[in-house]
Image (tube, helix red, strand yellow):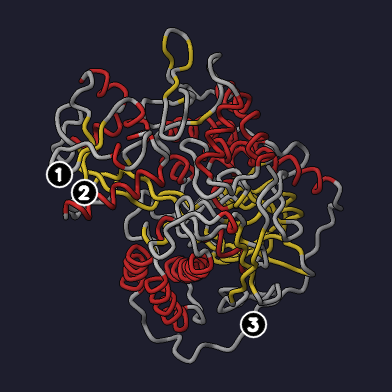
């Protein structure tokens, strides 16, 4: 089967090429061989692939240990059991992707999976074992047990512990934590580094021979999300403003089971809970998934999320319930210690009580278009992980393929960026790049950024969420455009303002793509176009109409 074509290509106008003004004579400069933006699994794996004597700088928006990758619960998928086969993992990934996966990318990633997982073990990651062998879980959409996990249900935490420790031992890498990337720097059509900010040094121009973008996702665009506060679509936005093509922006994956306690923050309840046999019940106590899929609770995430929303509507109840009470209580508590602890804080015993859940925004399937090596459409700019559209996930990501993608493309981008950087002269000079513009007439007027951000999240959840239609998408587009008209042109001085500008821009891209795709496919459900249309088995790309 050939890879899906890209058609059509949309254009959207960002408010400005650069969010802030800067002049090279007024901002400090730093030079490096490879700049890595993002401290999650993709960024750390890229750093580990940069050989001596090349130097790298890794930029992390928060502390390294607080990346989105560290929040991952389920595990890393790979063919590690003799009764499994690469063809099975490939087939499951393609089935979940609903016709938009690139077969060659899926084959490449799936075949690399065992090697990448064993690399983690060699770097000190301690995965759960059973009788001396890796303990493998099964999750929704998988035909076999193939998900390696750690600390029961805190795989990301353990994997990132090992990766960060290994990366920190490198002599050729510097780590800038709690540093915000305002924009990528482009000159003569190529990426030359980034403008960054932190509260101790203010702005800094970081010039690099090659730049790797590994900033993660965009879950904070939505009111209901499993993502940490840092997931504000910054990477998607800076790539777009720099001229990179973005693709598949209509596909946001909603995780079916997020702990629902009114008034509390949302907590992910891993796919592995259903993989170990938990049932989904509605408020009347009835199991309902068989009405929506022959795979029942183990259907892919898009199917389960949409089924839960339909059942909530049918029963007029704000959530459904996970039922583990029929499973061995000791096993449940040992297998899911983190989830058990979170639930116990609300007086819920996961082995004895029903757990209230509902869907939440979880994983941004769309992002910067990359090739198998991790190249974006902008020379000098590479990308890996959730900020990309690699062709692996198609219209819906298969559970536990995300950490795997970060490892594979983190390695590829690190190796390939290093090869190019090694061939470039060491005498880097800063181009005469200046960002100047008139002051916005209302720039000194105070905005309630928290209220705007909350309003954006509510609007996106309501009209660009699990269910969509033209009327809601049109309404969302008008509202987001209205906000962006008076927020986008302003110049802010702190991340709170830049994050809002990034989220507004990326929301516009998501709405534009969702309006263009007039069918239902994967995570994109159009109630006014409820069927999958074979004629639309193609990507939708978006580019800026501003020159970079």
* Residue 509 x/y as whole percent: 53, 68
**Contact check, label 1 and label 2, Cβ < 8 Å:** yes
Q: Mark 2 = which residue?
A: 319
Q: Is residue 280 left or right of residue 521?
A: left
Total residue callouts:
3
User: Of residues 330 and 81, which is closer to you in this image?
Assistant: 81
Quadrant the C terminus occupies: bottom right
Of marks 1 and 2, which one's residue comes earlier in the chain? Answer: 1
For the residue labelled by badge 2, is the local secondary structure a helix, a strand or a loop? Answer: loop
Quadrant the N terminus occupies: top right
Residue at left offset 33%, top offset 69%: 450
**Contact check, label 3 and label 1, Cβ < 8 Å:** no
Residue 436, numbered label: 3
Residue found at the very far top of the displayed protein: 131
Q: Disc 1 or disc 2, which is closer to the eye?
A: 1
Residue 313, numbered label: none
Q: Disc 2 or disc 3, which is closer to the eye?
A: 2
Q: Give the distance between the C-alpha atoms of the residues marked 2 and 3, in whole angstroms.
A: 50 Å
* Residue 131 x/y as whole percent: 43, 7
**Vertical position of residue 74 compared to residue 239: above or below:** above
User: Of residues 199 and 97, which is closer to you in this image?
Assistant: 97
Of marks 3 and 1, which one's residue comes earlier in the chain? Answer: 1
Of marks 2 and 3, which one's residue comes earlier in the chain? Answer: 2
Q: Mark 1 = which residue?
A: 283
For the residue labelled by badge 3, is the local secondary structure a helix, a strand or a loop? Answer: loop
* Residue 307 x/y as whole percent: 31, 47
Q: Disc 3 or disc 1, which is closer to the eye?
A: 1
Residue found at the very far bottom of the displayed protein: 441
**Contact check, label 2 and label 3, Cβ < 8 Å:** no
Q: Badge 3, how many Cα within 10 Å: few under 14, some, many 20+?
A: few
Q: Can residue 46 be seen in this view?
A: no
Q: Which of the 4 image quadrants contains residue 540?
A: bottom right
């Amino acid at each position: 089967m050939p890879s899906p074509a890209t058609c059509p290509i949309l254009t959207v106008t960002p408010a400005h090429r650069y969010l802030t003004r800067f002049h090279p004579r007024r901002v400090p400069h730093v030079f490096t061989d490879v700049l890595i933006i993002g401290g999650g699994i993709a960024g750390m794996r890229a750093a580990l692939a940069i050989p001596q004597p090349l130097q790298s700088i890794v930029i992390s928006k928060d502390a390294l240990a607080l990346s989105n990758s560290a929040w991952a619960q389920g595990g890393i998928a790979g063919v590690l059991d003799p009764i499994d086969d690469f063809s099975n993992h490939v087939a499951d990934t393609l089935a979940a992707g609903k016709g938009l996966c690139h077969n060659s990318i899926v084959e490449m990633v799936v075949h690399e999976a065992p090697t990448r997982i064993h690399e983690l073990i060699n770097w000190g990651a301690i995965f759960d074992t059973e009788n001396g062998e890796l303990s493998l879980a099964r999750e929704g959409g998988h035909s076999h047990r193939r998900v390696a996990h750690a600390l029961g249900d805190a795989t990301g935490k353990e994997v990132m512990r090992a990766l960060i420790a290994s990366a920190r031992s490198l002599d050729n890498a510097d780590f800038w934590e709690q540093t915000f990337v305002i924009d990528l720097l482009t000159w003569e059509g190529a990426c030359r580094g980034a403008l960054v900010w932190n509260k101790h040094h203010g702005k800094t121009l970081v010039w690099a021979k090659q730049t790797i973008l590994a900033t993660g996702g965009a879950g904070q665009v939505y009111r209901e999300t499993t993502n940490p506060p840092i997931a504000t679509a910054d990477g998607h936005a800076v790539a777009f403003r720099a001229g990179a093509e973005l693709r598949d922006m209509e596909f946001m994956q909603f995780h079916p089971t997020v702990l629902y306690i009114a008034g509390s923050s949302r907590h992910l309840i891993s796919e592995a809970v259903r993989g170990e046999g938990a049932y989904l019940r509605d408020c009347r106590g009835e199991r309902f998934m068989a009405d929506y899929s022959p795979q029942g609770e183990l259907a892919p995430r898009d199917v389960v999320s949409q089924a839960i929303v339909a059942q909530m509507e049918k029963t007029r109840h704000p959530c459904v319930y996970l039922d583990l009470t029929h499973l061995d209580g000791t096993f449940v508590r040992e297998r899911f210690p983190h989830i058990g602890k979170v639930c116990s804080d609300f007086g819920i015993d996961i082995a004895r009580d029903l757990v209230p859940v509902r869907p939440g925004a979880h994983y941004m399937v769309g992002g910067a278009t990359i090739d198998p090596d991790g190249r974006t459409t902008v020379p000098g700019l590479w990308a890996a992980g959730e900020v990309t559209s690699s062709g692996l996930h198609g219209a819906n990501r298969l559970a536990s393929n995300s950490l795997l993608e970060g490892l594979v493309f983190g390695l590829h981008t690190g190796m390939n960026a290093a090869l190019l950087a090694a061939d470039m002269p060491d005498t880097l000079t800063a181009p005469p790049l200046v960002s100047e513009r008139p002051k916005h007439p209302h720039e000194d007027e105070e905005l309630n950024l928290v209220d705007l951000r909350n309003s954006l999240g509510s609007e996106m959840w309501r009209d660009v969420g699990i269910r969509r239609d033209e009327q809601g998408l049109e309404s969302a587009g008008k509202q987001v455009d209205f906000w962006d008209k008076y927020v986008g042109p302003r110049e802010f001085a702190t991340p709170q303002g830049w994050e809002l500008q990034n989220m507004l821009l990326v929301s516009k891209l998501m709405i534009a793509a969702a309006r263009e795709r007039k069918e239902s496919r994967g995570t994109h459900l159009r109630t006014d176009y409820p069927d999958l249309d074979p004629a639309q088995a193609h990507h939708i790309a978006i580019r800026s109409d501003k020159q970079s």
